[in-house]
Image (cartoon, rainbow, N blue to C red):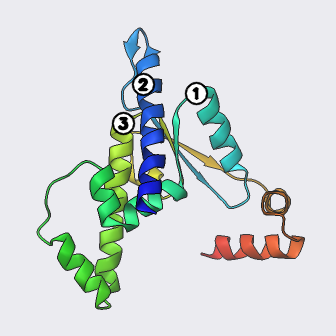
Amino acid sequence: MARYIEELVSQQVRKSELARSKSTVNGQPCGGLVVTISRRMGSGARVIADKLTHDLGWSLWDKELIEPMAEDADVSRRVVEAFDEKTISEIELVARAVLGDQEMGGFLYARHLARALTAISKLGCAIILGRGANFMLPDALHVRIDASDDVRIRNMMQFEDITHEEAEHKIRRSDHD
């Protein structure tokens, strides 16, 4: 699994590097340009993000790539640049999480998530879908995508091939969470 994620990450990194080498603003190469997209379930943000990445040639970073980077210390270590060491070692955090200290496990996840998002933003020419990136990357362009409940339910029915009731339930649960 980790190898598969590394390959996907490498593809996205190459996309960003290629886009950065081609992009210029006022004749100068673009640096760490990043767009974060937050959304409500069923709003169609995924379709918009896919279109943007296609049109701009940028990389797209979503739950499928960022979650494994944040959850797996080994993947994170290999993919994300090394940052300053903290006073509590990762081994201690993992041990505490295994022993039931969920607060420390959550801290470890948040730490890896922040590292992943920081590395992606340094890479630039990237679109980040969800994962709270809009809160962690203050210098990015932040976009919020929303739609009416009726549109969101119709989208969920179409995207996931589910009934109206199932779509409505998923959306209500997501909104509540």
Q: Position of residue 11 (x, y in %)?
A: 47, 40
Q: CA distance from mark 1 to mark 3?
A: 15 Å
Q: Earlier in the sequence, mark 1 or mark 3?
A: 1
Which residue occupies 37% across, 13% down?
Answer: 28
CB of mark 3 within 8 Å of CB of mark 2?
yes
Residue type at numbered disc 3: Leu
Which residue occupies 58% across, 27% down?
Answer: 56
Q: Position of residue 158 (x, y in %)?
A: 84, 58
Say few, some or many: other residues with alpha carbon within 10 Å of mark 2 (under 14 / 14 to 19 / 20 or more): many
Quick one: SS at disc 1?
helix
Quick one: SS at disc 3?
helix
Q: Earlier in the sequence, mark 2 or mark 1?
A: 2
Quarter assignment of residue 95: bottom left
Q: CA distance from mark 3 to mark 2?
A: 9 Å
Q: Which residue is mark 1?
A: 56
Callout count? 3
Quick one: SS at disc 2?
helix
Q: Which residue is mark 3?
A: 123
Q: Which residue is mark 2?
A: 20
